Amino acid sequence: MSTNTTITNGKNAFSAFIDGVRDRWASAPGWQRWTVYVLLFIAALLLPSESLGPIMSPYSDWASVLFFPIGTYVVLAIGLNVVVGQAGLLDLGYVAFFAIGGYSMALLGTRMGLNFWEILVAGVILSAISGIVLGGPTLRLRGDYLAIVTLGFGEIVRQTAENTDAIGGPRGIAGIPHPPSIDGVTVFGVDIFHYGVLDPRPYYYLLVVVATAIIIFVKRWEKSRVGRAWAAIREDEDAAEVMGVPTFKFKLLAFAIGASIGGAMGVVWASKTISINPNDFLFMLSATILAAVVMGGSGNIPGVILGAFLVAWLPERFRGLSEYRIMVFGAALVALMIFRPEGLLPSRRRKAELAEGTGGMGAMGAEVPDPETHAAAAEGAAK
Amino acid sequence: MFDNLLGSFWPYTIDGLILGAIYGLVALGYTMVYGVLRLINFAHSEIFMIGTMASAFVVMTLGITTPLTGFALVGGLLLMVLVGGFASAGSAMLLERIAYRPLRKRGASRLAALISAIGASLFLQELFALVLIPHVFNRPQQGRNQMGVARIMEKDTLFTFGGAQIRVDQVLIFVAAIGMMVLLDLLVNRTKIGRGIRATSQDPETAVLMGVDIDKIVRMTFLIGGLMAGVAGALFVLQFEVTKFSIGFLLGIKAFTAAVLGGIGNLRGALLGGLFLGLIENYGAAVFGSGWKDVIAFTVLVLVLMFRPTGILGESLQQARA
């Protein structure tokens, strides 16, 4: 009993601390926020420092780990968060868009000889179109049907790539070109625009810039009419429709935006990797990214970034246990859903929704809450 | 393009029906849990995997190397099915107790339950790949390899039909699968437990008021679903003679597809959906090549959901005759 109380107290203290930080943040003047943003950006640029390497990643090159998996997972999680966290649509096949981006880079780069920047635009457009093609017929479905259809779509994309010899079949595509380099721009001894084979740092900086641009876009959307429409759809789709929100259009938009972010990341990733094959795009990656979103606190961008960072970094850091990492990861997911279903850093609104059982496809059936749960839910709603 | 299919239409049909019957048995678990809890039991594919593993374990423990005959064969088959069925039923109940009930009690969202299911699914797969196959099955370093299972019965041809040789084991599997489904149908439609299951899926709150013990009903649902998946696992081992830690993943998605095809929550629909999917998949493989089998199955899923989201027979665990 007493340990139980201690745990609850600890949990409350953590939540209270987070809430305190959030209040301070909400009332901070604009220049303070911008200072923090700029500091965070600089911190992200300084991350690949050699003094951090041995602590953060003793087993492999820290700057490489920062590009993949950490940075890649962070961007993918931000993209999936638009679909799952903001619009409340469960997508289990997000890896499909990453694959479409990756294959765009590989095919357009090796066959058509386009350069990275042209392909980035093309890849974003192609993956957005594929998002609309998938979403168009399926977004009218109920939440959990959508989950299975997207899962099926992810597998269709991967297996089609595996079975089509024209795009390399199971061997994939090799010799993907790097982004065009601009040599000689040296900052602290790093040739920051030289996209070669040896130094991963220029790719990481490119990723940070792309990620920052995506975060700015997503943030602006969240605060706009579009973001409010998504929140309304997530909480109660029927009510939103009655209130005049064109739910289908906004769901499709969320799908297209999520898809284009996944596609953009696919292009950036493939431009460093040199060769890709269908096995880079397994369901496991979709599940991992979804877990990152939910674990961090779906709907809240800092939470999602934290979740993706942890999901990507912990297995790299503890390579010694690498054999057991998926097993531990699975058990951790179950434990997290039991003890903190709202994630590590949830947005307040999301937390209230989860306490009510709305948001995220509603509550399970056969659930007749006892008075205690009712009270807790009411309390959560009141907050 | 169609020569292959037309040339050996009946063999493809027979294979499709056998596979379809196994899909149907696994689909029952999805459909019942969905009917009662409105939850996609994502870890059900691992329950099936446990069934295949348990019956493979029986074959290995009995030290069978040559096919059995007579009473030994009957005993061996029964043991496989029973051990597979109970191992799966037990794990399904354990899964419900650990991964779902705490969430249900708190009224957590279905998204949370689905994530919990994905977590449980990963955990179970890795448990077999890293711990059970290397140490209990004594295949160190091979946890992730496909495991061959010795042939337990001679696969003699029983009779020929339209150019297809129909084997004893195929008839046995098909009859066993259909028999299990008939039993389940009777259970749900004729017994008190079945009435409880139907009542709960219609309206849990009213069911509680009428004296239905919901926790018990949910436990029973997982038990029955697990039992069906375990039997399916044993039949799968009998037919294909292999298993693997990840064998449930694709089969699970397809069984879910079958459940959706038949109208989720609808028991007879699950069988029909399973057979339909098995046939389509085999015919498709005959026309386009076996590499496209899964793509065809998923495309069927997408098309059905687009044009008839309630499935072939409609959704109706609750509407099954009272």
Image (cartoon, coloured by chain):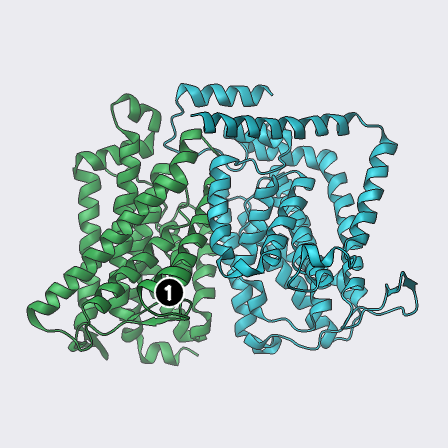
Chain colours: A cyan, B green
In terms of image quadrants, where is residue A29?
top right
Percent from the top left, x then y, of residue A164? 56, 74
Name the residue nearer the viewer: B31 or A66: A66
Toward the viewer: A294 or B209? A294
Q: Can you see residue A382?
A: yes
Drawn side of residue A223 relative to residue B53, left or right: right
Q: Residues within 10 Å of mark 1 (few under 14, many from 20)?
A: many
* Residue drawn at point x = 37 percent, y = 65 percent: B280
| Residue for point 21% across, 47% down | B184
Whether residue B318 is visible = no
At x 34%, y 25%, the residue is: B205
Is residue A202 positioned above or below B44 on the image? below
- Residue A62 pos. (x, y %): 71, 60
Left or right of A45 in this view: B54: left
Residue at the left extreme of this rendering: B71
Of the pair A321 and A90, the residue shown nearer to us: A321
* Mark 1 belongs to chain: B
The percent coordinates of residue B154 (x first, y second) are: 17, 76
Q: Quadrant of the N terminus of chain B?
A: bottom left
**According to the image, label 1 marks what residue?**
B280
- Say if B202 sits above or below A97 in the image: above
Q: Position of residue B296 (x, y in %)?
A: 45, 65
Q: Amino acid at mark 1?
A: Ile
